């Protein structure tokens, strides 16, 4: 427990009287008598640190004593703690007297650095105090209460022992993981010339593990280790040179160190050397050498090498495509715990690529990757249960998979959970929870969540419908690069949906969406130029926008291009090309194209072909087709004249707003 120490300022004080029969921690007087440094200032700093250690132990024992409700002991410990507190101030005053200067902030900072160097940065400091100042009874109680092994102190004269202790703390092997303690042991062993300790210290400086990131210090220690033929240090030097960290970027030097590391059979060095050959980094590009070193690295347990070989064989990059080999390499990386490879193995089992299809194996590998918080695997696994792909459909299980992933903070999964809550899939329908999860994802700038919020607030059937919020979320999605958002904003202003109709604003939004490649925004721009809405009418510009939209697959744009080509509007007249477009669209089921073809054939008195296209369009409830078919029955064109049928079709068309059908009904009723 960290606590703020409040010093009691007294010109003279007496140490608190502590009953040693009840509590046998070392007294402050004992500390001042037995803890000495190299000079007065060093002594004061060391004493201050020692007192703080004992004060901290006392605080810890007070906390533990609450469980036992032993008030007499608690009072004694509190008195002991106060004794340490007073002694700390006394030592500080001695320090001030020794330096004989004003108590400035710089002086205070220097004092803090001096005593904290002992408290936090001196190996075995606490252990030495316990051994030196605690009697047998106090030691026993301390170790029993705190669970520290009595053998925690190590021989600091043996560099290998010191290094291994640092490694133990770094990896959390049978001790609580501590980068702070690992750093201290690595530093000690490095200063003693231990090559692995030098590498480890360089690594901590390079990665900023506990200590502030410092590539110059990392470089220094890597070089010391490299001089002793430490392969890991050689590889790390290659990394620094390849990225220009602490040194000027130098591809040849990077290659040089990766090669030295690889020659010593270091798997990471072999992998990086293979990468150099793959990309021609610091050397001539050579796929043969790249494969050679990737294979060596894979044999030595480098997961990325195995994974990359899998990708090379899967895609046939520099090797003959071999999906079976690809699977084997992915599987090797997966068995080494690489989540991306586990996902890949799951996909290949699911698709039966490179291995016999096995959905159970897919679930097994997706689950392994998901347990490592691999987002794609969580999403795929959830979708398998949600849609029943290869497994029995289980929406509840799917929801829980997505929810667990969403709780990790991933916006993709948060958005998915929001969708499931909104539609009540796998859980009870709850729009408030849905909005909450969408908001979490949107706050992380996830575009789809912004769109979901915008659509909700635009179309909600509840009292929380809010067009202002809808516009805000569409705008945010647009600012994040979502073309659909700009298109939707444009439509709101074009049609005046819950906002004042404004062609200029619509034009601006459609132009933004078009710039991002939204086919519908391009289509709307074509329509605005065709009708002169907010812009000067221009059939040529209209045709150009329809063309761009059509190339992206917008069917109505393709239809409008056909009309313009047929009549020569905004482009050169080309009825042959127009008919080919119309037939293609009509065959693919577009009702507008079917109806227009029917008009063309009708104008040429090819009534059978006209009728056939109208029937197909009427099946799609097209109002224009209903009106034309009514006309054919009214006049008996290709079909037997039937006024009742004609009226039926006119009524259907009129209900959809067809004015010609309305006029026909008026005519027939007179």
Image: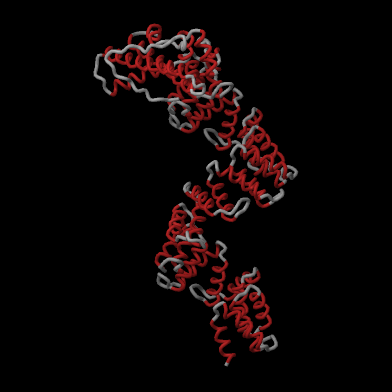
Locate residue 536: give its quadrant.
bottom left
Would you place residue 316 above or below residue 33 in this image? below
Q: Nearer the viewer, residue 256 or 394?
A: 394
Q: Residue at x 57, y 34 (%)?
A: 275
Q: Is residue 223 left or right of residue 341?
A: left
Residue 660 in the image: state x and y as whole percent: 55, 83
Q: Nearer the viewer, residue 413 or 61?
A: 61
Q: Nearer the viewer, residue 337 or 134?
A: 134
Residue 113 in the image: state x and y as whole percent: 36, 20
Residue at the bottom extreme of this rendering: 670
Residue 432 in the image: state x and y as whole percent: 52, 53
Q: Residue at x 57, y 76 (%)?
A: 575
Q: Is residue 424 left or right of residue 570?
A: right
Quarter of the image with the N terminus in it: top left
Locate residue 150: give its quadrant.
top right
Residue 293 in the image: state x and y as whole percent: 62, 31
Quarter of the image with the C terminus in it: bottom right
Locate residue 89: give its quadrant.
top left
Residue at the top extreme of this rendering: 33
Would you place residue 655 above or below residue 223 in this image? below
Would you place residue 304 above or below residue 456 in this image? above
Q: Is residue 484 left or right of residue 630?
A: left
Q: Nearer the viewer, residue 548 or 437?
A: 437
Residue 57 in view in this figure: no
């Amino acid at each position: 427990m960290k606590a703020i120490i409040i010093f009691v300022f007294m010109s003279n004080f007496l140490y608190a009287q502590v009953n040693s029969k009840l509590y046998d921690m070392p007294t402050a007087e004992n500390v001042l008598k037995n803890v000495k440094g190299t000079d007065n200032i060093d002594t004061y700093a060391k004493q201050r640190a020692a007192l703080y250690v004992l004060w901290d132990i006392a605080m810890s024992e007070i906390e533990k004593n609450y469980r036992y409700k032993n008030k007499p002991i608690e009072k004694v410990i509190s008195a002991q703690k106060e004794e340490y507190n007073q002694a700390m101030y006394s030592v500080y005053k001695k320090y001030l007297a020794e330096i004989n200067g004003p108590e400035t902030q710089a002086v205070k900072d220097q004092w803090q650095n001096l005593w904290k160097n002992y408290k936090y940065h001196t190996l075995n400091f606490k252990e030495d105090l316990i051994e030196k100042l605690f009697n047998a009874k106090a030691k026993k109680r301390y170790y029993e209460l705190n669970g520290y092994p009595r053998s925690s102190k190590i021989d600091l004269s043996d560099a290998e022992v010191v290094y291994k202790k640092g490694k133990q703390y770094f990896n959390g092997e049978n001790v609580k993981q501590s980068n702070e303690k690992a750093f201290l042991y690595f530093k000690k062993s490095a200063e003693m010339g231990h090559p692995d300790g030098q590498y480890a210290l360089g690594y901590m400086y390079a990665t900023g593990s506990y200590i502030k990131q410092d590539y110059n210090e990392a470089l220094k220690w890597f070089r010391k280790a490299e001089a002793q033929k430490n392969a890991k240090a050689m590889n790390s030097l290659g990394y620094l040179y390849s990225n220009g960290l602490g040194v000027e970027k130098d591809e040849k030097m990077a290659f040089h160190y990766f090669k030295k590391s690889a020659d010593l059979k270091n798997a990471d060095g072999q992998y990086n050397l293979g990468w150099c050959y793959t990309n021609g980094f610091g050397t001539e590009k050579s796929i043969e050498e790249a494969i050679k070193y990737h294979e060596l690295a894979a044999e030595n347990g480098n997961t990325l090498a195995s994974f990359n070989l899998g990708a090379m064989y899967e895609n046939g990059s520099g090797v003959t495509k071999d999906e079976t080999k690809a699977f084997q390499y992915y599987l090797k990386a997966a068995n080494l715990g690489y989540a991306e490879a586990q996902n890949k193995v799951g996909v290949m089992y699911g698709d039966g690529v490179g291995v016999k299809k096995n959905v159970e194996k897919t679930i097994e590998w997706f689950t392994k990757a998901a347990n490592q918080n691999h987002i794609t695997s969580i999403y795929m696994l959830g979708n398998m249960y949600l849609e029943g792909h290869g497994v029995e459909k289980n929406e509840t299980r799917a929801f829980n998979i997505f929810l667990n992933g969403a709780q990790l903070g991933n916006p993709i999964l948060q958005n998915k959970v929001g969708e499931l809550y909104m539609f009540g899939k796998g859980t009870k329908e709850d729009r408030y929870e849905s909005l909450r999860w969408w908001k979490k994802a949107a706050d992380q700038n996830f575009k789809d969540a912004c769109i979901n919020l915008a659509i909700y607030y635009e179309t909600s059937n509840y009292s929380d419908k809010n067009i202002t919020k809808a516009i805000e979320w569409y705008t945010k999605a647009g600012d994040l690069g979502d073309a659909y958002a700009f298109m939707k904003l444009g439509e709101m202003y074009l049609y005046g949906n819950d906002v004042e109709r404004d062609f200029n604003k619509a034009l601006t939004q459609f132009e933004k969406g078009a710039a991002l490649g939204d086919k519908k925004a391009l289509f709307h721009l074509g329509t605005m130029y065709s009708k002169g809405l907010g812009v000067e009418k221009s059939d040529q510009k209209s045709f150009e926008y329809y063309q761009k939209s059509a190339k992206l697959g917008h069917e109505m744009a393709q239809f409008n291009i056909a009309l313009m080509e047929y009549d020569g509007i905004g482009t050169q007249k080309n009825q042959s090309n127009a008919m080919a477009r119309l037939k293609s669209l009509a065959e693919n089921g577009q009702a507008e194209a079917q109806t227009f073809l029917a008009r063309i054939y009708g104008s040429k008195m090819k009534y059978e072909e006209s009728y056939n296209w109208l029937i197909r369009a009427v099946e799609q409830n097209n109002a224009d087709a209903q009106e034309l078919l009514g006309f054919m029955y009214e006049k008996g064109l290709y079909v037997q004249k039937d006024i009742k049928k004609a009226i039926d079709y006119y009524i259907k068309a009129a209900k959809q707003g067809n004015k010609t059908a309305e006029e026909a009904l008026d005519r027939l009723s007179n």
